[in-house]
Image (cartoon, rainbow, N blue to C red):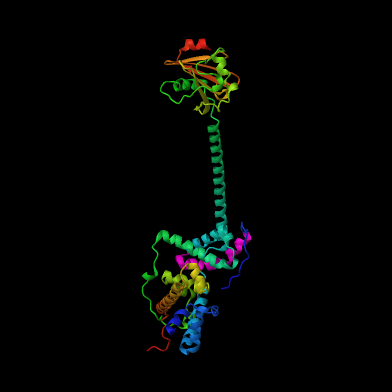
Amino acid sequence: MTNDEARFILRSFRADGSDASDPVFNDALRRADQDPALRAWLEHERSVDRALGGKLAEAIPASRSPAEIIARVKNRRQRQRTWQTAGWLAAAALAVLLAVSATLRLYPSQPDVHQLIRFALTDAGPARNGHRGTPPTVGTAETFPGPAGLRATVTALPALVDLKAVDCRTLTVAGHEVLEFCFGSGHRFHVYIALRGTFDTEGMGSAPLFSEQGQLAAATWTDERHVYTVVTDTGVDALRALL
Amino acid sequence: MEYRALPALSYPMSDEAFEQVVVTYHTALFRFALSLARNAADADDLTQQTFYVWATKGHTLRDPSKLKTWLFTTLYREFLKGRRRSTRHVAFEDLPPTEQDPPDIEVSAINRMDADLVLAALQDVTPIAREPLNLFYLQNMSYLEIAEVLDVPIGTVMSRLSRGKAQLRTLLAQKATEGKIIEFPQQGTGS
């Protein structure tokens, strides 16, 4: 180590000697012990540093008082807490809104039964595919509707078969689940069954409600638990006679 | 200037603990802030911001003996945040060359100087050298602590201290010359 290198290192040596045990300064301090010129330089350097440190400590620049800083920081924290609270409240309100919205989506409002009928008349038209066969437990396509009549046969379906287990279509109409079966070999009968509470059937009496759309006719009726719509291409009169 | 280690703090920090930290470190932090910002208003804001950060994040400090370094480091980071927004950082390489051997200065000359003049000379040192110099003289920090606060290597701290001291002495010599009192001739000595 040269004296220049030692001086460079010792310029970081604190004047009060608190770095004496730091090994970084060992070599430089040892050299200063052995070299009178370097030792004198170090002593002078420490004296100057002490004087500068003392002089700088005397200068006390005007600043905000601790009390003012404490008050300002507390005030700012209070404002921050207020905003945080407002933020939490807004987030909670948003969560409630989302929950309500999701609930409404899960449990949509009760649509009019005519929506189901209009859907059935369109769905049963020739342009639509995907219609499936007869549930095996209710007889063959050829024997449908059978001696009991169309209405009695269809109304008995939920009691006779586990509707979802048989080969039927599951549709969604206005947010509600509707099941569909197909019967008949010559004329086709499309039966749509939904839970009664899901569609507004107010005003419907015990008598079936008839509708037409193009070549298709529909008959709709209810029992205590279900809404039934049968669509066929026989025409309204033939359909009325079959019920 | 001596600082006492404060007890470990729980969260939320009590008012008393917070106030104790402000009272203890307010002046030291303000001095450092002033050396960075070079005007009292900005230094006040920096100091206040440092205590705000302490109030909100101080509970993360596990070792109470590191409080002083933590506060100075925080203040320096807050200063750098503001500076990044406004000005270009001056790299050490950009600094003008400094004299290797600064002008010699006598202790007696320093003692005769006004404290504000010495402080003003320190403020005129190039910022990158002024930062470690301030921590060295005013906070009596070791080169290791300075390196931690400024987040620079130890060698860089030593180099900046060396150059900073040289600059400070040059500036003090200049200010001493500028402010030298010209004595009037004594009565009766004139012709």
Taking the image as shown, residue A119 lies to the left or right of residue A75, namely left
Q: Quadrant of residue A129?
A: top left
Measuring from the top left, give residue A117's x and y in whole percent.
49, 20
Q: Is residue A24 above or below residue A167?
A: below
Total marks shown come to: 0
Taking the image as shown, residue A92 lies to the left or right of residue A132, namely right
Q: Nearer the viewer, residue B67 or A147?
A: A147
Quadrant location, the N terminus of chain A: bottom left
Residue A92 visible in the shown view:
yes
**Which residues are drawn in magenta?**
B15-41
Residue at horizontal 50 percent and vertical 71 percent from the top: B146
Taking the image as shown, residue A164 lies to the left or right of residue B42, namely right
Residue at horizontal 59 percent and vertical 60 percent from the top: B59
Residue B41 visible in the shown view:
no
**A208 inside magenta stretch:** no
Q: Is residue A157 above or below residue B26?
A: above
Measuring from the top left, give residue B121's x and y in whole percent.
44, 74
Measuring from the top left, give residue A227's x and y in whole percent.
55, 20
Residue at horizontal 54 percent and vertical 54 percent from the top: A76
Measuring from the top left, give residue A132's x and y in whole percent.
48, 24
Q: Quadrant of residue A203?
A: top right
The main secondary structure of the magenta stretch is helix
Q: Is residue A20 above or below residue A87?
A: below
**B31 inside magenta stretch:** yes
Q: Nearer the viewer, residue A176 or A59?
A: A176
